[in-house]
Image (cartoon, rainbow, N blue to C red):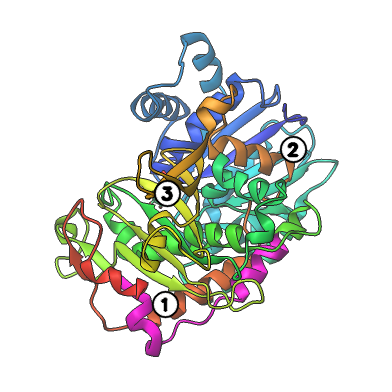
């Protein structure tokens, strides 16, 4: 899809951020290479450091070489790409410095109005978002200044606020400056091919959905495990912790995709209505139930990481038991486990079905050995497997678990896009289905705030690096 706009400008706040270096520059470069960007586009990097346009271009070059070694950087196309980059030094909190940004944005505008197509990208810490948005508005660059057929949109990176209160405040501020259809709250998990496929798997096949209820499903397990630590993000992690970093967004979005009702149609609002309903139906976490439904952990050595307090209590692991109090899911546990520095990197969702009423092939408890499962592997494998019991060859009638498997890599010749490619294109096209709506952001914070409150004062349990987390995490399965 080629973006059909002229004078397209991306303004990246946080031009020196890790996110910009690892995800945004490579994605924009490849989108340009693949012919998806319009002929006239510019990328304005905004940051606190003093850089000339040339410095900024060299920095982007260096970052692409460091973080995207696989990318094809031929000199000619890279030079052409770099010539689209401009830099504005800006003190995010100082209104006066936004005048320079105004001048740069207007540099190619033919009239003294925003005929442009402008996409702001806030790759900045959450507490800066309100002040940036207010200053943009006062500088005459706010969303409501759209005119003469142009458009203005804003992508806001997660975490969106740091709790319900700050998310609400941000929603108020952003709502004063942009319309909801101009706001793209990004969770890059929603751009992953296998995550998008959850809805397709459920609603394009007749055989799964009738069984997708409490009548047939025993439990659902969602795992987001990483075999590396917080990398250089000590400052961020000390503020966020895993509940804010992973559970509030990625984990709850996976849970909503598995549990949602079929939408009325595929409009962004119909789909997001159903996800919001799931989040609203989650049984509240309380101190009374926390003992068996919330286990937080911290990997050994976390306190020695750069920019981490020596007595930090921040969690890098969570094992949680959710219930969704609605007609379809009442009393079916949804186990969610996520953590840093675990034994392996793996994101997957396992839906385990109830045992048949009569187990002919072994003692009753052996059923769980072969019980039916649908296993949606999101990464690094991109597969869907169906587990069932089969007779082991031989004289005795013994059942073993076997798998039928679909693998993206072998079933399709097409290369998928990365989440940032896809979501950037979606935002440019104004397609909001894979972005989080205001109500869902707030419901998710409500849930995470309650989880945090329910265990207030309980220290995170230490766990060895490359283990499966604290041993006590097993409590949530009881
Ligand atoms: C980010 C989190 O949103 O997602 C990181 O801030 C995490 O802590 C990352 O490592 C995982 O995303 P992916 O797509 O690399 O698995």
Q: Secondary structure at mark 2?
A: loop
Q: Position of residue 130 (x, y in %)?
A: 55, 64
Q: Position of residue 85 (x, y in %)?
A: 53, 28
Q: Residue at x 71, y 51 (%)?
A: 203
Q: Nearer the viewer, mark 2 or mark 3?
A: 3
Q: Secondary structure at mark 3?
A: strand
Circle 1 crowding by C-alpha within 10 Å: few under 14, some 14–19, many from 20 = many
282 vs 117, left or right, is: left
Q: Quadrant of the N terminus?
A: top right
Task: Label the magenta part by its dominant secondary structure.
Answer: helix
Q: Residue at x 66, y 27 (%)?
A: 37
Badge 2 is on which residue? 116
Q: Is residue 382 above or below residue 445?
A: above
Q: Earlier in the sequence, mark 3 or mark 1?
A: 3
The reply to whether discs 1 and 2 touch (Cβ–Cβ < 8 Å) is no
Magenta span covers which residues? 272-295
Q: Nearer the viewer, mark 3 or mark 1?
A: 3
Q: CA distance from mark 2 to mark 3?
A: 40 Å
CB of mark 3 near ligand 1 (< 8 Å): yes
Circle 2 crowding by C-alpha within 10 Å: few under 14, some 14–19, many from 20 = many
Badge 3 is on which residue? 347
Q: Residue furthest front?
A: 395
Q: Residue at x 21, y 55 (%)?
A: 467
Residue 292 inside the magenta-drawn segment: yes
Q: Position of residue 129 (x, y in %)?
A: 53, 59
Residue 152 inside the magenta-drawn segment: no
User: Does any portion of residue 82 appear in the rendered image?
Assistant: yes
Q: Earlier in the sequence, mark 2 or mark 3?
A: 2
Q: Position of residue 14 (x, y in %)?
A: 46, 46
Badge 1 is on which residue? 451
Q: Quadrant of the C terminus?
A: bottom left
310 vs 92, left or right, is: left
């Amino acid at each position: 899809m080629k973006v059909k706009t002229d004078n397209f400008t991306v303004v990246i706040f946080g031009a020196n951020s890790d996110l910009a270096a690892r995800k945004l520059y490579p994605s924009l470069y490849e989108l340009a290479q693949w012919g998806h960007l319009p002929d006239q586009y510019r990328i304005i990097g905004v940051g606190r450091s003093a850089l000339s346009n040339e410095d900024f271009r060299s920095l982007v070059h260096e970052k692409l070489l460091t973080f995207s070694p696989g990318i094809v950087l031929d000199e000619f196309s890279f030079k052409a790409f770099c010539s689209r980059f401009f830099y504005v030094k800006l003190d995010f909190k100082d209104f006066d410095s936004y005048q320079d940004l105004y001048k740069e944005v207007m540099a190619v505008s033919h009239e003294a109005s925003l005929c442009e197509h402008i996409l702001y990208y806030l790759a900045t810490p959450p507490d800066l978002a309100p002040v940036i948005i207010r200053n943009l508005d006062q500088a005459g660059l706010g969303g409501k200044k759209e005119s003469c057929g142009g458009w203005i949109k804003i992508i806001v990176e997660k975490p969106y606020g740091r709790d319900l209160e700050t998310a609400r405040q941000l929603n108020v501020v952003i709502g004063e400056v942009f319309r909801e259809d101009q706001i793209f709250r990004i969770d890059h998990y929603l751009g992953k091919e296998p995550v998008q496929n959850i809805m397709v798997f459920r609603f394009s096949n007749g055989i799964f959905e009738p069984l997708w209820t409490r009548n047939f499903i025993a439990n659902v397990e969602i795992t987001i495990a990483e075999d590396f630590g917080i990398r250089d993000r000590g400052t961020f992690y000390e503020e966020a912790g895993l509940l804010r970093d992973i559970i509030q967004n990625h984990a709850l979005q996976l849970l909503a995709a598995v549990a949602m009702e079929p939408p009325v149609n595929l409009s962004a609002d119909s789909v997001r209505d159903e996800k919001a309903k799931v989040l609203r139906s989650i049984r509240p976490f309380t101190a009374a139930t926390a003992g068996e439904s919330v286990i937080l952990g911290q990997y050994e050595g976390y306190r020695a990481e750069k920019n981490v307090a020596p007595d930090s209590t921040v969690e890098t692991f969570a094992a949680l038991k959710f219930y969704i109090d609605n007609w379809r899911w009442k009393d079916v546990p949804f186990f969610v486990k996520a953590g840093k520095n675990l034994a392996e990197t793996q994101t997957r969702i396992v839906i385990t079905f109830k045992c048949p009423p009569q187990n002919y092939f072994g003692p009753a408890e052996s059923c769980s050995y072969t019980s039916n499962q649908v296993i949606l592997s999101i990464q690094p494998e991109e597969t869907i497997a169906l587990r069932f019991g089969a007779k082991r060859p031989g004289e005795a009638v013994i059942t073993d678990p076997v798998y039928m498997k679909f693998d993206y890599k072998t079933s399709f010749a097409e290369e998928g896009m990365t989440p940032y490619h896809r979501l950037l294109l979606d935002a440019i096209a104004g397609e909001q289905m894979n972005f989080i709506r205001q109500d869902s952001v707030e419901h998710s914070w409500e849930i995470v705030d309650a989880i945090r409150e329910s265990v207030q004062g309980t220290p995170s349990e230490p766990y060895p690096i490359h283990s499966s987390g604290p041993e006590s995490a097993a409590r949530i399965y009881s």
